[in-house]
Amino acid sequence: MAQERKNAATFKGGPLTLIGPELKAGDKAPDFKLVDTGLKIVTLADSKGKTRLLSVVPSIDTPVCDLQTKRFNQEASKLPAHVAVITVSMDLPFAQGRWCGLLGADKIQMLSDYREHAFGQAYGVLIKELQLLSRSVFVIGPDDKVQYVEYVKEVTEHPNYEKVLGFIKARA
């Protein structure tokens, strides 16, 4: 049975349980099998050798998730070419593709964990009560080690954009 972290996050102040471990800088990044907007399976190894900024959101069709994904899409063009910016959610790949098309979001890769919820469990962001992913940000280095982690305590709040972007730019 997967590890459960009670009260690890909140939604509008109400406590939520996150399934999976709490990753820390220095941990080996768990592999994943996610689905892109063209229904292709994508793994961590597909971006080997790059620094990966993983922006995890509950649903692209909510205001904070929408703004978070827009922000990282805008920032992606200012980051070095060896940085891949990836948004992960439980949204169906079709919804992710629609969102990208409507917004012209072409600097990020959208990936879905809808099939197995394995990413959510491996990264400790699967919300037990909602079966959605908890808002979080991970930076994974070219060596597949976790370099930066932010689990946003209140799911309806934004991550610390300046901190994560500053972290990446300082290592560029």
Image: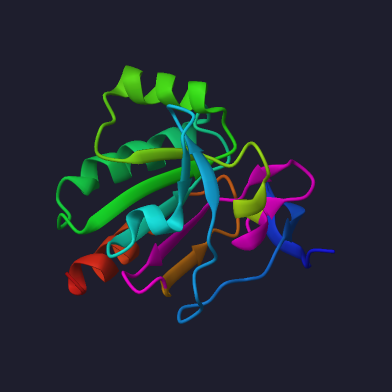
The residue located at (57%, 44%) in the rendering is 156
Image-based side of 114 in relation to 42, left or right: right
Q: Position of residue 17 (x, y in %)?
A: 77, 57
Q: Residue furthest bottom?
A: 26
Image-based side of 75 in relation to 14, left or right: left
Judging depth in this view, the residue of 47 and 171 nearest the camera is 47
Which segment did they paint magenta? Answer: 121-144
Confirm whether residue 35 shows in the render.
yes
Q: Position of residue 47 (x, y in %)?
A: 34, 55
Residue 125 figure quarter: bottom right
Q: Locate the C terminus by quadrant.
A: bottom left
Image-based side of 108 in relation to 132, left or right: left
The residue located at (14%, 50%) in the rendering is 78
The residue located at (75%, 63%) in the rendering is 7
Q: Residue furthest right?
A: 1
Residue 83 figure quarter: bottom left
Confirm whether residue 159 shows in the render.
no
Q: Position of residue 19 (x, y in %)?
A: 73, 59
